[in-house]
Structures are given as structure tokens and as C-alpha cells.
Image (tube, grey):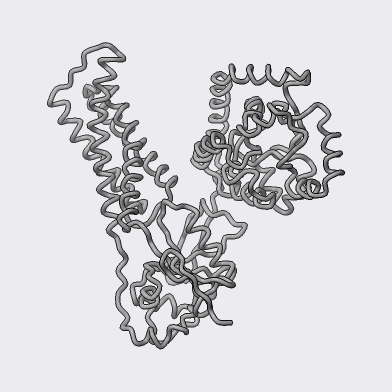
């Protein structure tokens, strides 16, 4: 069947079955083009480096100004800092700033594209390290230290760096220097998955220039230039997506790519496997790579930190939200039914527990559901597929508002205090949902279910049940404490804008 093309972002993309021209189709043209070194545009990296340096300088000055305001207005005292103290602070922070830049360079921030939340994690981590070193040195040398300046500086530093990067990235995007066009070589499904992954984080600036068949690329074209192939598509990166058969990546192809200095990457199939927590170990003279998996959830310190964070956050939220909880309880009580609804859910290790919620349904909810499913075949199918109804006749008016804002789940903070749930984790399920997890049920049972989770920030009710299971399992396989913090931060806009709620 002839290939069909349409325009996508100003470049050729593929329709039909999602595969484009083979390398052989370009053979005669590529042989006429002289292979040349493909130079990747790297102007963006210098701008990011410069923005980090500027941000740290701005944070230093703002911290000085803010410390003066805090002392004069809040603490009502005169704050005096001598020129010698300022010079000492400049020298110390200058050294620490260079150390921070070196660490970020080591993590690849000025070499490759870094996902936004990964960048936030690295910047936060190195800022905490800088704060500890700064405090230790000043204490060890018994230097006079302004605590207000110290705290303002190290609170502002990560915020300034991340904020300046957002501004810089947007400016580079407008100037056309941030986008990176990628040519994907892979089978239909593998290429589709790779494309979805690249486009899932817009902050990384990837654009898909096109897709070609992997078998054609791996077959090789004698005398052809892969650099010329990339130029044909206007791409700067060749992404190899071998799918379930990594052995399709033939040695001659990789050798040719290395010889031409073509920038390429490989997305191996990781379906059902952890994607993080590996320690790579190469072996001299052997074409093998040992990947030792380290499950973060099994580390005692990580488990303890998660429990401590859950308990501290639950107590704090209950104290802050006590007036809201009492007001909601009074509104629900107006129809004469109970305030709370307790349902048996499956928890850690398969243990059952009573999951608490504010009651959002009529008192005779079970009978109303049976009548609704019996009289509406479409509703019966929707319930069978998702265990939810978009137009649920059982929900009360106040209950609908509570569900859309997720306020009905606030009583689960008491489940968190009882260590039956966590702030972040898989959605708690009922007994009859267990078969839906199939062979991956062990993932669900290995952690405590959460008040929020990856499913809730990935579409909520707009996603299918199968996708929900996939997200829950991915969360368990790749868990980190930082990932929990990211999910909590993403939960706020999801709740405020009621994304995927009904």
C-alpha cells in the first residue's frame, strides 16, 4: 500500500497504520548526499546555565532585602550587616553556587532535556545540601550569622532557579530554540508508545518529525547517510523503538550511527517492568549490562519517612480543616441520614478495613442502583466497565458537590492516622474489584491505598478501569517519596478545577 503523508507541525508525519517510508526508499537520494557530522543545536544549554547563575544571584540579593524587611517590620528590630560580613557571605555563597551548578551539570541539566519535576527534585536536593554546608561552615568557624538572611536565601534559591528556568524555557520556545525534532524508527505499536511518552511532558520540547519502519532502519543501507535521513525529516535526534525485540538493533546500524556522530536514543520495551531504581553495571570486554533493581519501598528509611510524613500531614490537615469538616457534617445531616459512610475496602496485605467518606448518596442507595441498572442497559454496561456512573441517581445534591471537589474523601484522613491508608497510593478497591487486577494484584496489596494517587491526577473518571489498574501498578513499581510529593502538588489543581470529577 502506498505511503500517505500529512503535515504535522510543519514536517511530514505518517497516517494509515502509523508507519512511514523505509530507509531503503531514501537509498538513492541518501547515497548522493555526502555523510557529514550532524551537529545538535545546543544553544539552549548555555541559556539554561546562564539562567541558573542569574537566579542564584537574584536569590542572594532578594534574601538580603527580605531579611531586612523581616527584621524591621516583623521582628521590630534594627538589622545591621557590615561590609566584611557581606563580603564573607558573597564568597561563601559563590563557592556553593559553583558546587550547585557542578552537581546539576553532573545530573545532565545542561546536556540533555530534563523533565520538569525531575529538575525540581534535583534543584531542591542540591539547595538543601548547600544550606547544610553553609550552616555547618559558619557554625564551625564561629562566624556571626544572620538567621533571617540564611533562611531567606536557602528558601528563595530553589524557587528562583525553577522560576527562572520556566521563564527561560518559554523565551527559548518563542525564539524556536527549545524545540527538538525527533525521528522515530520503530514498529507501529512501539513507535506509538514512544511518541506518546515524548509528548507527555511539553516542557521537554520534543516534536515528532516523523516515523519510519524499524526493520528498514536495522536492515541498513550500504553507503547511505543517517545524518542525511535526519536532515530529510528536519530532525536532530533518531529514536530507536525496537518494541519487544531489542535484538533488531543490529550492530552495523549502531556502528554507522556512531561513525556519523548522529545523536540517537533507544527506548526499550519496559512493559510491566520497573523503570526506576536500577543500578547499571557494565562488564569489561562483554556486550552485557547488569541492571540490579533496588525497590525503594523496601528500604526501611523510605518506609519510615513515608509513615512519618503521612501522620504529620494528616494531623495538620485535620486541625486546619476542622471547621470545614463540621460545616459539611451539618449540611449532610439535614436529610436525616448518617454523616459518614463506611465501606469495606481491601488494604495492605489484602486486609479489609472500613474506608470512611462523607455520605454523598441517598439512604436507600443500593435499591436505587439496582432499579437504575435494571431499567437502563447503557447504565448497566457503564457500571460493569468502570464501577461508576457519570449520572448516578443515588447521589444527593450536596453529595454531587462534595464528589466534584473531592471533599467527600476528607474523613479518610482518619484512616491515614490508623495506618490503614496513606496520603498517596492506589485507589482503595472493594472485594469484587480484585479480579480486575489479575496477575498484578500483588502490586496493589504490597502498599497501603491512598487518599489520592497517580490515577486521580491522570484523568480520574475520564480514564478506563484498565488504565487505572495500569497506573496503580506503575506507581508501586516506581515509588519514591518525591513522587508522592509531586502527586500531592498535582492533586491541588485537579481538585480546584474538578478535572475528571463527576
In the displayed structure, would residue 333 be above or below residue 11? Answer: above
Residue appearing at x 17%, y 26% in the figure: 85
In the displayed structure, would residue 113 be above or below residue 411? Answer: below
Horizontal placement of 102 versus 264: left or right? left
Tell me if residue 435 can be seen.
Answer: yes
Horizontal placement of 413 versus 341: left or right? left
In the displayed structure, would residue 437 be above or below residue 361? Answer: below
Residue appearing at x 81%, y 32% in the figure: 365
**Residue 76's image quarter?**
top left
Camera-nearest residue between 42 and 248: 42
**Residue 229's image quarter?**
bottom left
In the displayed structure, would residue 359 be above or below residue 99? Answer: above
Camera-nearest residue between 102 and 406: 406
Give the position of the C terminus as an image quadrant: top right
- Percent position of residue 257, x then y: 39, 75
- Percent position of residue 385, x then y: 75, 50
Amino acid at each position: 500500500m502506498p505511503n500517505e503523508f500529512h503535515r504535522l507541525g510543519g514536517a511530514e508525519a505518517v497516517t494509515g497504520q502509523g508507519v512511514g517510508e523505509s530507509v531503503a526508499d531514501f537509498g538513492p537520494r541518501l547515497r548522493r548526499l555526502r555523510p557529514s557530522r550532524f551537529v545538535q543545536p545546543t544553544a539552549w544549554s548555555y541559556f539554561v546555565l546562564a539562567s541558573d547563575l542569574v537566579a542564584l544571584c537574584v536569590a542572594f540579593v532578594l534574601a538580603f532585602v527580605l531579611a531586612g524587611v523581616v527584621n524591621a517590620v516583623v521582628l521590630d528590630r534594627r538589622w545591621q550587616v557590615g561590609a566584611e560580613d557581606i563580603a564573607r557571605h558573597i564568597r561563601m555563597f559563590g563557592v556553593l553556587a559553583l558546587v550547585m551548578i557542578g552537581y546539576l551539570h553532573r545530573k545532565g541539566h545542561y546536556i540533555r532535556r530534563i523533565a520538569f519535576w525531575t529538575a525540581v527534585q534535583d534543584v531542591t536536593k542540591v539547595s538543601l545540601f548547600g544550606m547544610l554546608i553553609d550552616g555547618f561552615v559558619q557554625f564551625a568557624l564561629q562566624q556571626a550569622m544572620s538567621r533571617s538572611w540564611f533562611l531567606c536565601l536557602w528558601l528563595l534559591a530553589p524557587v528562583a532557579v525553577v522560576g527562572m528556568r520556566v521563564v527561560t524555557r518559554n523565551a527559548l520556545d518563542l525564539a524556536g530554540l527549545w524545540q527538538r525534532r525527533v525521528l522515530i524508527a520503530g514498529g507501529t505499536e512501539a513507535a506509538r508508545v514512544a511518541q506518546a511518552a515524548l509528548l507527555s511532558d511539553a516542557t521537554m520540547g520534543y516534536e515528532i518529525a516523523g516515523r519510519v519502519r524499524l526493520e528498514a532502519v536495522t536492515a541498513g543501507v550500504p553507503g547511505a547517510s543517517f545524518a542525511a535521513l535526519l536532515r530529510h525529516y528536519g530532525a536532530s535526534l533518531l529514536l530507536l523503538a525496537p518494541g519487544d525485540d531489542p535484538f533488531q538493533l543490529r550492530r552495523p546500524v549502531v556502528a554507522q550511527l556512531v561513525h556519523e556522530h548522529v545523536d540517537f536514543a533507544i527506548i526499550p520495551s519496559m512493559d510491566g517492568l520497573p523503570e526506576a531504581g536500577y543500578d547499571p553495571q557494565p562488564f569489561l570486554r562483554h556486550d552485557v549490562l547488569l541492571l540490579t533493581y533496588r525497590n525503594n519501598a523496601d528500604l526501611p528509611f523510605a518506609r519510615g519517612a513515608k509513615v512519618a510524613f503521612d501522620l504529620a500531614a494528616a494531623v495538620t490537615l485535620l486541625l486546619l480543616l476542622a471547621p470545614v469538616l463540621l460545616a459539611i457534617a451539618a449540611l449532610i445531616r439535614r436529610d436525616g441520614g448518617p454523616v459518614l459512610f463506611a465501606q469495606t475496602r481491601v488494604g495492605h496485605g489484602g486486609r479489609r478495613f472500613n474506608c470512611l467518606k462523607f455520605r454523598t448518596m441517598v439512604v436507600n442507595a443500593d435499591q436505587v442502583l439496582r432499579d437504575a441498572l435494571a431499567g437502563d442497559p447503557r447504565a448497566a454496561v457503564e457500571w460493569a466497565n468502570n464501577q461508576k456512573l457519570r449520572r448516578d441517581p443515588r447521589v444527593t445534591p450536596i453529595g454531587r458537590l462534595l464528589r466534584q471537589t473531592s471533599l467527600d474523601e476528607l474523613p479518610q484522613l482518619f484512616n491515614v492516622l490508623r495506618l490503614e491508608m496513606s496520603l498517596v497510593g492506589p485507589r482503595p478497591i472493594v472485594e469484587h474489584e480484585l479480579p480486575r487486577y489479575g496477575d498484578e494484584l500483588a502490586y496493589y496489596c504490597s502498599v497501603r491505598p491512598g487518599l489520592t494517587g497517580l490515577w486521580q491526577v491522570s484523568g480520574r473518571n475520564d480514564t478506563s478501569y484498565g488504565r487505572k489498574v495500569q497506573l496503580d501498578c506503575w506507581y508501586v513499581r516506581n515509588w519514591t517519596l518525591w513522587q508522592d510529593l509531586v502527586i500531592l502538588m498535582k492533586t491541588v489543581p485537579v481538585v480546584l478545577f474538578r478535572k475528571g470529577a463527576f
